[in-house]
Amino acid sequence: MRLRLPEERPAEPPTGYKIAHPVLSQDGTRAGFTGVSLGGALPYGALADASCVYGLRHRAPHRRCDCGFHCVHDRATAEGLLCTGEHRAAVLLDVTVLGAYIRFELGFRYARQRVRVATVGPCACGAVAVALADAGWGRPGWRGLAAACAGCVHGRTSVSLAGFARLAGDGLRVVAGSGHGVVAGVGHGVVAGAGLRPGVAHGLGVPELVAEAALLQARLDWFQSRLAGLEERGTDNRPKG
Ligand SMILES: [Zn+2]
Ligand SMILES: [Zn+2]
């Protein structure tokens, strides 16, 4: 006897939430995400198809496997995952579930995904993030990124939130959260990258430009302090006599 799950034919694709680490390609031209547990080795873009993480020759999600993208129905459930120590630097993703899916009590396992919004938490110091900066870990060909404020970004490899959205493409929006579960539209939020295409700057609003300016200023300050340090050393090393 074969049990069949009832088939659903929703008018609109379902949506859900998940957490992931933002990643930047080695050459800095592509941006994406990597899962926090299963499938964490395979970075994915803003619009992506799942493949079996075990390399099995079936379509993900397969009923007798646990492959495929995963998400939960409730934003609060996904936000709860960000409380654990190892997930503090992860970002919250708002996703559209595309293609075949398997519904669970808490969420979906599915074939194709569009990440619509990435909400970046505060910098480790507590200030609102203006950038995603090298987090000191990675996968072959990909650097892991974490939220950084203008004061903490220093000379690390980093991209602004709008820059990350541009590199990821496919209409991704990147939003700075305040760290209290608050997102864009509540005053602290910086909405970036909505509908941006590479090379198109006029899509940037005031909050995005303020965030970009803060990042540029922080980088300039860091560069000038390094330069001042080098000049001092240069003076000391000058041959005497
Ligand atoms: Zn599988
Ligand atoms: Zn900071």
Image (spheres, helix red, strand yellow):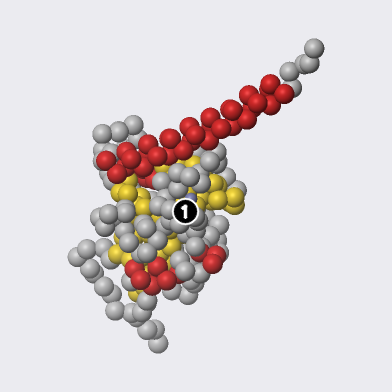
Q: Is mark 1 within 8 Å of ligand 2?
A: yes
Q: Position of residue 195 (x, y in %)?
A: 27, 44
- How many residues crowd around disc 1 within 10 Å: few (fewer than 14), some, or many (20 or more)? many
On screen, residue 67 above or below 189 = below
The residue at the far front in this view is 241
Residue 240 located left or right of residue 189: right
Q: Position of residue 128 (x, y in %)?
A: 40, 52
In the rendered image, the quadrant that contains the N terminus is bottom left
Q: Position of residue 225 (x, y in %)?
A: 56, 32
Q: Position of residue 106 (x, y in %)?
A: 37, 76
Amino acid type, residue under disc 1 in the picture: Cys
Point 35% across, 50% down: residue: 174
Point 47% across, 49% down: residue: 148
Residue 28 located left or right of residue 185: right
The residue at the far bottom in this view is 1
Residue designated by label 1: 123
Write down the quadrant of residue 216 in the picture.
top left
Q: Is residue 190 visible?
A: yes
